Amino acid sequence: MKKIIYSPGEPAGIGPDLIIKLACSKSWEDFKIPIVSIGDPNLFLQRAKLLKKKVKIEEVSSLYNLKNNFKGTIKVLKVSKCANTFPGKLYKSNAKYVLDNLTFGIKEALKNEGTALVTGPISKENIISIKKDFSGHTEYIRDVTDSNDVLMMLASKKLRVSIATTHIPLKKVHKLITKKLIINKVNILHKDLVEKFNIKKPNIKILGLNPHAGENGKIGVEEKKEIIPAVKFLRKNNIDVSLPISADTAFSEKNLNQTDAYLGMYHDQVLPVLKALSFGDSINITLGVPIIRTSVDHGVALDIAGTNNSDTSSLELSIKTAKKLIR
């Protein structure tokens, strides 16, 4: 039976709010797939009270024999206690709670066939306070699933973008752009476009690292030394991938219409474009791992947590996409 696990993320943020608001909406039953939220039942009850939403908490102890969603009822599986349930302020004492829930969700998705993981926003700042090497959902899922490599994709109806490097300082990016890295990332992207998105022969466009894609080595050498050799290797393996193109023209209407996915070199090269075109209507998808994981495209939004100002659009799309990707 297909089912979805929801890990709400940072309890001080809007992750709990979103699932409560969805559970009280018409969409909840329309999903037609059981959704189990991981967390402390008390957190959801207290947040629902702040939001002035009437919800019933149905505590479950496993992912077996689940019924479809019923409006106003949230299935909750408790892994650990949330120390501080108050919204709007980060508490270090909640960092372990967030990681416990996320780890449980990953492992359950890994061992339960037909199960997808949907994640709410986390505070990297808070988790790093107890786990110094934490860099984000993507790498953490790679490590817990013991995967060789991983790729972060953000997708909307208008475009799909992925990133060769993720949450690292800009000054370190150029050192990481190697032929091997590009080959690995494009192979993951191509494989999952075919297998998960059912695109038989995907067209992938690679962005250059430097302005004007390096101008043949005149404005940086990464394209000439690393990216182009990687592209030539990939083309020999029948992957339809472009030579590095300049980011300032990559997202023209013509290119958008011809491209199944982009591979950017760093976080802020491609995500501003996607979010300018599709903020709230895009999601994060983890590629290269043996589970289905989708996520909202926004942060914890501490300033509006516990109010009714949060928008459920991205979570709704994350759930719908996860359901489609389950085989």
Image (spheres, rainbow, N blue to C red):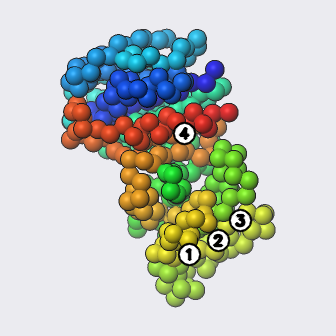
Q: Give the number of the mark in front: 4 or 1.
A: 4
> Could you say whether the residue bearing mark 3 is in a helix, strand or loop?
strand
Of labels 4 and 1, earlier in sequence is 1
**Is residue 29 positioned above or below 253 on the image?**
above
Reading the image, the residue beneath label 1 is 245
Mark pair 3, 4: CA separation: 25 Å
For the residues bearing labels 2 and 1, Cβ distance under 8 angstroms: yes
Reading the image, the residue beneath label 2 is 242
What residue type is disc 3 on?
Asp
The quadrant of the image that shows the C terminus is top right
Q: Residues within 10 Å of mark 1 (few under 14, many from 20)?
A: some
Residue for point 54% across, 24% down: 32
Reading the image, the residue beneath label 3 is 240
Mark pair 1, 3: CA separation: 14 Å
What residue type is disc 1 on?
Ile
Q: Quadrant of residue 277?
A: bottom left
